[in-house]
């Protein structure tokens, strides 16, 4: 019987593990792959407070993940590799079944399984991820100051990202396959009125080309195909939560788990943190904060069993 089982070891899960261990909780983290989550795909992390070697050189996502993992482990959190295939509430405990292995038990569970970006699914997208292809403007926008940046999408996130990127470059091209935005009118108007952003409707990216990094994109516009220079492509066609095996959880219209401000879900003792949670902003720093808040709440929940 653990005090808390944390499912997922991205920034939110690692933060929760650290705070749980420091709170003298018997905490286990279960991760499918390796600690770090999406951090492992980030070349350089410049927007996490204190994460730098000197003025010009920040740590990579992998290095930050390693530090967070080591810190949590040194404080007493346990880690194991496995895929959680079922979680059931049994009176005053949760039964957590690991695929091909045993069932473990905990007083509380923290869901930190994260989310994944929807892909364009075109040639060059995966090959140049981290070398000109990005899914996060606040993370990677500063690397492309003064460069020609393409943004793919037509919803709120695409308009937000394009507007944000315009602070770094006067040459932003927002391409959308439809003839109008799906974004809220205020966000769409802000983009359409921004002189640094050129909007191309009825346009889609067919291919991303490059060698060591992106140098062009193939576009299709009103049936015509052509190649044009590009330094970066930011893909903003939405994200979706990673699957989590508790179907009765209350979720929003996009499938993200709904919580209150204490990170509590619709099931007492089950908390959700990070990108899997319904949230207006998803960053490493907010995920870490979610993890800390969830543990604070979980401690009170577990302590209620001892009176």
Image: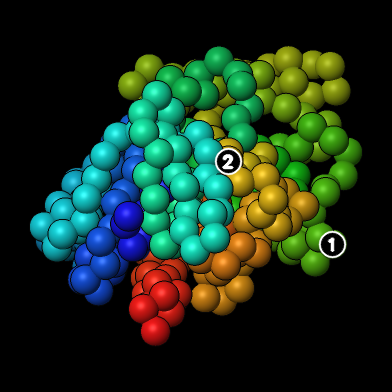
Q: Residue furthest right?
A: 179
Q: At 25% across and 74% down in the image, what residue appears?
A: 23
Secondary structure of the residue carrying tag 1 is helix
Specify whether residue 11 is in view.
Answer: no
Q: How many numbered discs?
A: 2
Pick whichever, 14 or 266, lies toward us.
266
- Neighbourhood count class around disc 1 (C-alpha, 10 Å): few under 14, some 14–19, many 20 upward: few
Q: At 61% across and 35% down in the image, what residue appears?
A: 118
Q: Which mark is residue 185?
A: 1
Q: Position of residue 122 (x, y in %)?
A: 60, 19
Query: How was the colour assigned to the protein in this rendering?
Result: rainbow
Dot 1 or dot 2: first in sequence order is 1
In the rendered image, the quadrant that contains the N terminus is bottom left
- Neighbourhood count class around disc 2 (C-alpha, 10 Å): few under 14, some 14–19, many 20 upward: few
Secondary structure of the residue carrying tag 2 is loop
Q: Do labels 1 and 2 touch, CB within 8 Å?
A: no
- Which image quarter: residue 152? top right
Pick whichever, 118 or 219, lies toward us.
118
Specify whether residue 246 is in view.
Answer: yes
Q: At 66% across and 54% down in the image, what residue appears?
A: 249
Q: At 35% across and 40% down in the image, what residue appears?
A: 31
Q: Position of residue 289 (x, y in %)?
A: 40, 70
**Residue ID for mark 2:** 245
């Amino acid at each position: 019987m653990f005090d808390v089982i944390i499912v997922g070891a991205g920034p939110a899960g690692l933060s929760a593990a650290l705070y749980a261990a420091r709170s003298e909780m018997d905490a286990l983290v279960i991760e499918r792959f390796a600690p770090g989550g999406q951090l492992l795909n980030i070349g350089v992390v410049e927007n996490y407070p204190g994460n730098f070697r000197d003025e010009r050189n920040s740590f990579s996502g992998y290095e930050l993940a390693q530090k967070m993992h080591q810190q949590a482990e040194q404080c007493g959190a346990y880690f194991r590799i496995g895929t959680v295939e079922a979680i059931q509430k049994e009176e005053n405990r949760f039964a957590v079944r690991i695929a091909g292995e045993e069932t473990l038990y905990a007083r509380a569970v923290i869901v930190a399984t994260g989310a994944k970006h929807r892909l364009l699914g075109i040639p060059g997208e995966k090959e140049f991820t981290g070398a000109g292809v990005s899914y996060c403007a606040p993370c990677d926008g500063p690397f492309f100051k003064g460069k020609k940046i393409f943004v793919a999408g037509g919803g709120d996130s695409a308009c937000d990202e394009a507007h944000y990127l315009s602070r770094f470059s006067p040459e932003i091209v927002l391409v959308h396959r439809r003839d109008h935005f799906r974004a809220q009118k205020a966000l769409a108007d802000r983009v359409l009125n921004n002189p640094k952003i050129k909007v191309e409707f009825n346009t889609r990216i067919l291919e991303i080309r490059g060698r060591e990094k992106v140098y062009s994109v193939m576009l299709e516009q009103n049936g015509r195909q052509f190649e044009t220079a590009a330094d970066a492509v930011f893909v903003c066609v939405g994200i979706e939560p990673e699957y989590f095996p508790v179907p009765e959880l209350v979720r929003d219209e996009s499938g993200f788990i709904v919580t209150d401000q204490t990170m509590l879900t619709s099931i007492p003792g089950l908390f959700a943190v990070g990108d899997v949670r319904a949230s207006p902003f998803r960053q490493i720093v907010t995920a870490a904060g979610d993890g800390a808040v969830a543990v604070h709440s979980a401690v009170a929940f577990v302590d209620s069993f001892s009176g």
